[in-house]
Image: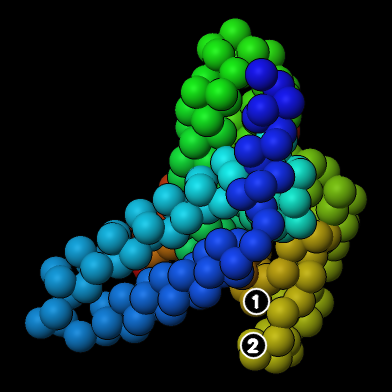
Amino acid sequence: MSDRFEAACAAESRGPRSTSLWFVGLALAAFVVAGFVGLATPERQFATFVLLGLGVALLLALFAWRVAGSASTPGGTWFVRCYFAAFALTTLALLYSASVPGFDFGVLFVALPTYALLLAIWLSAALAVLARRVFLQGFRAALAGHAVAWTVPPLVVLALAIAVLLQLPLRMRFALGRAELDALVERARVEPLLVTAEIAAWDTNEFHFVGTYPTRRIELFDGGVRVLVSSSGFLDGQGFAYCDRGAPPQLGEDFYDPFWGDWYLWRASW
């Protein structure tokens, strides 16, 4: 039965059928791109959403067909290897976004929908391969083959979710640049006028790094410093605040959450 399965996979991966699938895939990709472009026309948004959903569903079906017919394992073709490479890069992009207070929304806006699409592709391909194995090999043999490889994406997603909930990317990046952040606090305590003058002389069109974080805005107040991280947050910018006298003073509608020692996460109000 196993020989029958491998022979069927090899037979379906040869010939003009494979080439035709690529043409269909390119056509469907163009269809989806056209749907995104159509979103800019308000009076046609509903129809565009319907067409876009149909195009994505067809792309998922195409990928599942391709994987089920040409590879018995997730990694048997360069096509699937490219998928896992894209999955790894998107995971790294999400980890980078989570290393910024309130997330880097520029990166998150691109990476999160891409991640969702990649997971949908994985699910459709996994179900297609499993159904094919069950049909050709039986249920037990289907589950026994390459089960570990197919569990990699959901395990990575679970690990990513745990890391974000525990603020591991944020804490690791903060720890890498904490020495420079602490040095800024010490300078602000000893030479507040000099530090204020240096900040006032900044070119606001350029990023200035403090530790590992880019910033265009640093504020000194009695007892501490606030650093607003560029590209952080969505509507409200976010950053870090240091105060050795308890919670930083409430300025406007700002919010603070304890983070690390005398450091706080700061969400700046408008």
Picture disc at residue 225: none
- Residue furthest to the top: 140
Residue on which the image places disc 2:
204
Image coords of residue 167 (percent x, y) = 64, 36
Q: Is residue 113 left or right of residue 35?
A: right
Rendered residue at 83%/67% (across/down) = 191
Q: Contact, CB < 8 Å: mark 2 with mark 1?
A: yes
Q: Is residue 133 left or right of residue 174?
A: left
CA gap, disc 2 and disc 1: 6 Å
Q: How many residues crowd mark 1 within 10 Å: few (<14), some (14–19), many (20+)?
A: some
Image coords of residue 145 (percent x, y) = 70, 20
* Quarter of the image that includes the N terminus: top right
Picture disc at residue 216: 1
Q: Amino acid at mark 2?
A: Thr
Rendered residue at 70%/86% (across/down) = 206
Judging depth in this view, the residue of 159 and 253 nearest the camera is 159
Residue 206 higher or lower than 91, as above or below: below
User: Can residue 52 be seen in this snapshot?
Assistant: yes
Image coords of residue 194 (percent x, y) = 81, 77
Rendered residue at 46%/70% (across/down) = 24
